[in-house]
Image (spheres, grey):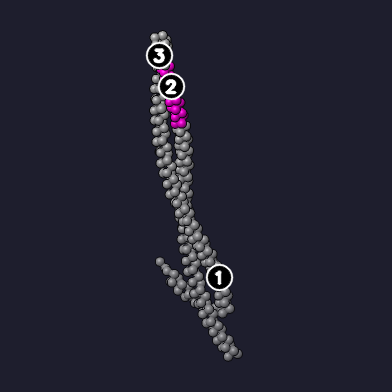
Amino acid sequence: MINRNHIIIFLILFTSIFYADKSSSDIQKDINRKNNELETLKSEIKQVEQSISTKLKEEQLSNEIIKQINNKISLTEKLIKTLNDEENYLIKLIYKAEDKIKLKEKELFTLKNQLKNRVRHLYKYGKQNLISQMMQSDNWNKIIYRTKYLQILNEYEQIIKNRINNSLKELKNEKSSLQKEKQNKIKLINNKNNEFKNLENEKERKKIYLVKIRNQKNELRKNLQIKKDMMAEVENIIKRLYSDKGEAKKREEEITKERYYFN
């Protein structure tokens, strides 16, 4: 494999042989052409360096964006875990509310049966006993007391019944509220899961784009090195041309002197 130094040496030797018989004015034209070529290379090198700088900024920005996406992913994962914990807690509360509702319904059912049985008993036996007691008893106060006691008992049981019904209503409202909150949590979890997937997809796209930027940056650096090598070769050629131009001028001066001498 021929290295760069060998190429430069070959070009210098070739230039020396090629320009040995050229006039100084012709060599100056070649120098001007090589200087233009050198300026073009310098301009191209500057553009490539600017492109590399741009790619470095894009790479830095992409790394920063990926870092931000990773932070968002981490926060979203934590939020999803918290929401799942809250959903499980709500499910437990709903189960507890259902158990309480069943218990209250059972208490209400028992109380209603007690009231029904008492009403049946009073209807079946109370009327006859009351008439019998009124005919046989001389103590009206005792009859009034029993009647009042039954009235108070019925009122108390009605109060208990109302309390149980109110408690049932509150528990059912609580259960309904918990179920709505649970549905909202599920909806929010689904939204956050979708957001998590979108972030993962966005992260993957940015990583692919980052690889593309790095490949482009590496290609630009290779191109930059090639152009710098070319510029160094052209500069060496220009130096050799100036040397050849000096030698050509000496030859031209000697030829002029010889012509002058022979004339």
Looking at marks 1 and 2 on the same chain, the residue that comes earlier in the sequence is marked by 1
Residue drawn at x 50%, y 67% as measured from the top left: 227
Badge 2 amino acid? Ile
Residue drawn at x 49%, y 65% as measured from the top left: 224
Give the vertical position of 19 relative to 206 (above or below): below
Q: Tell me which corner region of the image, top left, top right, bottom left or bottom right, holds residue 172.
A: top left
Q: Quadrant of the C terminus?
A: bottom right
Magenta segment range? 144-172
Label 2 packing within 10 angstroms: few (<14), some (14-19), many (20+): few
- Give the alpha-carbon distance from disc 3 to disc 2, as whole Å: 20 Å
Looking at marks 3 and 1 on the same chain, the residue that comes earlier in the sequence is marked by 1
Q: Nearer the viewer, residue 91 or 250?
A: 91
List x then y, in percent, for residue 25: 58, 78
Badge 1 amino acid? Glu
Q: Nearer the viewer, mark 3 or mark 2?
A: 3
Name the residue carrying label 2. 152
Name the residue carrying label 3. 139
Residue drawn at x 42%, y 40% as measured from the top left: 86
Residue 39 - label: 1
